[in-house]
Image (tube, rainbow, N blue to C red):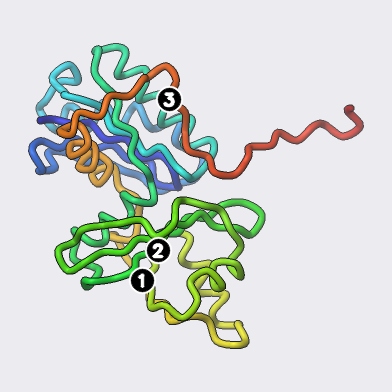
Amino acid sequence: MRILGIETATVVCGVAVVENGNVLSESFLIERNMHAEMLMDQVDRVIRGSGVGLADMDGIAVSIGPGSFTGLRIGLSSAKGLAWGVDKPIVPIATLRALAVRGIEGCGIPLPALVLPILNARQGEVYCQLFEVDEEGNISELWGPKAMSVQDLFREVGEREVILTGEGAGAIRSEMEHRKPPAPRLSFLTGDLARCSAASIALEGERRLRENCPVDIASLEPLYIAEFHIKSPAGSA
């Protein structure tokens, strides 16, 4: 099975092709506000690098959120266009779960563990979701994806030992340095495994497609969590 994966939920703009659990080709850049300009170039580069044509893919997996409003729209609209063009299914992959799986399968997280992927949101909030992982790597959700302040996150975590991953973990680390009383017992996954990855999206997409989970492409929307407000010009009604 061959899957094209697209990741645009954060500053990472990435594309990957996997086949039967192996990454054939991957490309990514880490730069804000470049997704619209660079995504299709990366698709072309990865397709050529994999040696597999787009029409030979079994499906297209896309990071569905939560994350950047603009990035998610760009990723999903591009995935839809590609899927319609070659008549292939889309597999939406939850961004926070993919982050957790990346840390676990990359052996960056010792098991068993509580894993909390975190992405930056707006107005001082973060997107987060808590997972419990057993000794065999089986994952279960302890709470669904949500947006909250850092202080609310500390209260939700309580006294549990939790491993944090994702680009939003930096805000938590910074808050911990100044917090009184001390913050909960948190540790941090760092480096490449703590970053969103198109390969992780593609690998998760391959698993999901094997489960035969059909999705209506036309009605598929990003998982925004927070409401997207468009500011009115000054003086308008």
Helix, strand, or loop for circle 3?
A: loop
Occupied quadrant, residue 76: top left
Quick one: SS at disc 1?
strand
Residue 196 in picture, x, y percent from top left: 35, 50
Query: Which residue carries the number 3 mark?
Result: 220
* Separation of marks 2 and 1 at Cα, in angstroms: 6 Å
The amino acid marked with disc number 3 is Leu
Q: Nearer the viewer, residue 13 or 214?
A: 214
Q: Nearer the viewer, residue 62 or 111?
A: 111
Q: Earlier in the sequence, mark 2 or mark 1?
A: 2
Q: Tell me if mark 3 has few (under 14), some (14-19) or many (20+) residues whose alpha carbon lies within 10 angstroms of its own.
A: some
C-alpha separation, residue under disc 1 versus residue under disc 3: 31 Å
Which quadrant of the rendered structure holds the C terminus? Answer: top right
The dot on residue 116 is 2
Residue at left offset 41%, top offset 77%: 160
Residue 31, given in percent of the width and then of the height, sits at 45, 46
Quadrant housing residue 190? bottom left
Question: Sequence order check: which comes first, mark 3 or mark 2?
Answer: 2
Asked if the residue at tag 2 contacts the one at tag 3, i.e. Cβ–Cβ closer than 8 Å, the answer is no
Callout 1: few (<14), some (14-19), or many (20+) C-alpha neighbours within 10 Å? many
Tell me whether circle 2 and circle 1 mark residues in contact (CB < 8 Å). yes
